[in-house]
Amino acid sequence: MSRKNMVRAALLAVCVASAALAQGDNAAVNLAAHPGWVQIPGALVPPECVHQIPKGARVVVNGDTITGDVTLNGVSVGHYNPCSQAGIITRPRNGRAPKLPAGNGWVESVQEQVPLGSGDNVDYVYGNWTVPTNPPANGGLIYLFNGTEPSNGQWILQPVLQYGSNGLFGGNYWVIASWLVGSNGYYFVSPAENVSPGDTIYGYTWITGVSGGTVYWEVYAYDATNGAGSWITAWTSGLQWNWAYAGVLEAYNITSCSEFPGSDYTIFRDSAAYHGYPSYDPYANWSGQVWGYGGPSCGFYAAPFGSYAYLFY
């Protein structure tokens, strides 16, 4: 029995996860109809709509709108207008995945929709994981991350590990970056930093302060092995953040199992979700989900086990 199957069998013996094929939206999406667009985490968008901002720069979100102003240490570093063309959302929202061409979309995730009272948010999502070995074959685009979303699914804050080119950066190597991805024509990313197989990645998304109805966020991807880090900050209002993701595998242009990392699985360790800022009350009721990405079947299985989140591929 392979190492992958041994670990999977042991986990199954002690944990029953709710791995299920999610129902997609009714209309299929033709990604090929948009040549030159770029596949960022969870969205296919025109390249001019993705804005790389300095490490630590701040974006302000008010409900489903955004000012377009970006500041760093209180100083303006840019103003961005909304995208003239609506992007195509390729991540699940409200428990439903869009119908995409085979081999594209969210593959699997360990997640929870945290039951919260009025005015409460998921205020801290944390975990660490190891950069996998490179895929035996190139051609695919791989994202591995944790993070959080509001109840309406319009935004996601996420520290991301990436293999492959998304059309803007990356290649046949691993990089980390932090993202604020919306569904209304705004997409922000911090500068990508190179990392290597075997490095330990820490992913943090947490509330650093609250003032009235404004919530202050920081999203941080950090390589504890080589010291590289990339982060963004955001101010949000008019949203309740109640989705937490301990680990997600998202993939595009996959035609064979050899285009997934050669490590067989990724473990997000010490995964935690908290709420009730400033007290950071723990809440953990993770469940596993395998999504209908339509590509090659590679033994996918997503399962929580205590504070670990296992993603098999």
Image: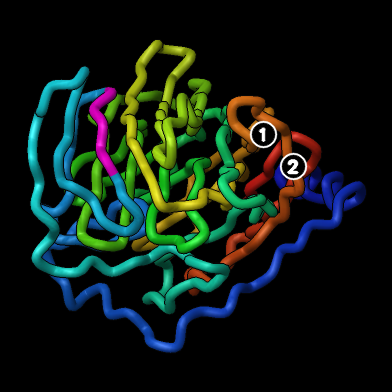
Residue extending farthest front: 212
Residue at numbered disc 1: 272
Mark number, residue 284:
2
Taking 210 as reference, is 174 left or right?
left
Whole-percent x and y of residue 306?
A: 80, 37
Q: In this view, does 179 lie above or below 97?
A: above
Name which residue type carries label 1.
Answer: Ala
Q: Is residue 188 visible?
A: yes
Mark 2 neighbour class, 10 Å CA radius: few under 14, some 14 to 19, many 20 or more? some
Give above or below for 227 relative to 275. Answer: above
For the question of whether residue 198 can be seen, the reply is no
Residue 307's x, y, as percent? 74, 34
Label 1 close to label 2 by CB (< 8 Å): yes
Query: What is the span of residues highlighted in magenta in the rendered image?
Result: 56-60
Q: In the image, is 178 to the left or to the right of 300?
A: left
Residue 197 position, x and y percent, is 46, 27
- SS at circle 1: strand
